[in-house]
Amino acid sequence: MDTKKMNFKVVFPVLLCYIVMGFVDIVGVSTGFARRDFNLSPEMAQLIPSMVFVWFFFLSIPVGVLQHNLGKRKVLLFGILFTTVGMFLPFVYYSYAILLVCFVLLGIGNTIIQVSSNPLLQDVVAKDRFSSFMSLSQFIKAISSLVGPLIVTFAVSQYGDWKLVFLVYGIASSIAGLWLMLTPVEESFSDERATFGSALKLLKNPFIAAMVLAIFLIVGLDVGMNTNIQNLLTSQFGISLEQASIGISIYFTALMITRFLGALLLSKIDNLKFLYWSSLLTILLLVVLVFSTSSLMAQVVIFLIGLTSGNLFPLIFSLTVNRFPERANEISGLMIMAVVGGAVIPPIMGLINKSFGVQLSFVVLVLSALYVFVTYYIIKKRG
């Protein structure tokens, strides 16, 4: 598609869906408050993000196949509907069980949104600007992620109820879904029939398998940071949970900044070199975070990690899809399936935290970033 032919009246409602996608990151703040409200152990608290991200493993490929036959826009609307219902539940009745149900629905909805939104975005923007718009979409998601902890902080300070964030999210999801429902979108379709088996067969391609694993670890790294920043700051430096929640906002502020810059730069610079330096710096900064000696130092490093790691997902996704555009639906399903890394990495960190302390649990994130760095050489070798 030629850049001049892009219809921004269609692009805008598609991009707005990434705001709803960002609601999933409220799981970080929610984990901390749920742990306090229900007196949960570290491993029980980390069950909350697992309830969100486990659905990416089970549903991503079926959703990818479904959208191939039903259409990306229709499937995306179903994802927004699940999210909307889930967001209203804890506001209506608050218990640990209801909170888990809320995040199950949020996880199902977010899985559908992530599988369908990226290929739909590819349909409405120019091919040579897809990586740029992927970063823009992640920038929009980061704004949503950033605002979540701020809404919680405001709700606690003004109304004494952090759960008001769910009401705000439910209303916003309804608006986004309605706008997309009223917007006609011209979608691309592949002649090759997509099936569950055809998607899984793509994993026999070593390159695609390596990139899917990279997405698994990138999301694990991101969710591991999100759900453990509070724990690190409170346990290591003795600050309050509310103060530690600001550390999550610092992280998402950095993600927002770097993804905005990525939206401007990725269409103009070498994406592969960008991947090299981003992943290398992320490794080094994670090591520094483990050995931070003060709350201020840790928060500065958290901000820098957000800056360096924020574009890893759109880089890997676009570098892969642009090599196999005719298999975009299936690759999207596989890669979003790999988002289950967000359900696997935090519990591993929780177990290490219980046995060896929170600092050593962050070594898991160092190893995750190290593999992403290795993918630079995998992509470079392929040419």
Image (cartoon, rainbow, N blue to C red):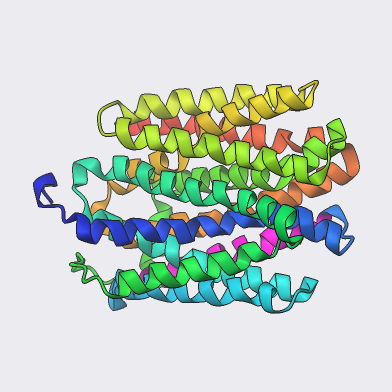
Quadrant of the image containing the C terminus: top left
Q: Can residue 307 be seen in the rendering of this structure? A: yes
- Quadrant in which residue 236 is drawn: top right
Q: Using the image as rendered, state which of residue 282 and residue 157 is in the foreground.
A: 157
In the rendering, at what x and y percent does residue 275 appear?
Answer: 42, 30
User: Which of the 4 image quadrants contains residue 136?
Assistant: top left
Q: Residue at x 75, y 48 (%)?
A: 348
Left or right, residue 330 beside residue 85? left
Q: Is residue 377 visible?
A: no
Which residue is rendered at x = 47% and y = 66% of the image?
A: 172
Magenta highlight range: 43-67
How many dots with numbers?
Answer: 0
**Residue lying at the far front of the rendered structure:** 158
Indicate the position of residue 46 as horizontal and vertical percent values: 76, 56
- 290 lies left or right of 113: right
Q: Residue at x 56, y 49 (%)?
A: 147
Q: Is residue 166 above or below residue 238?
A: below
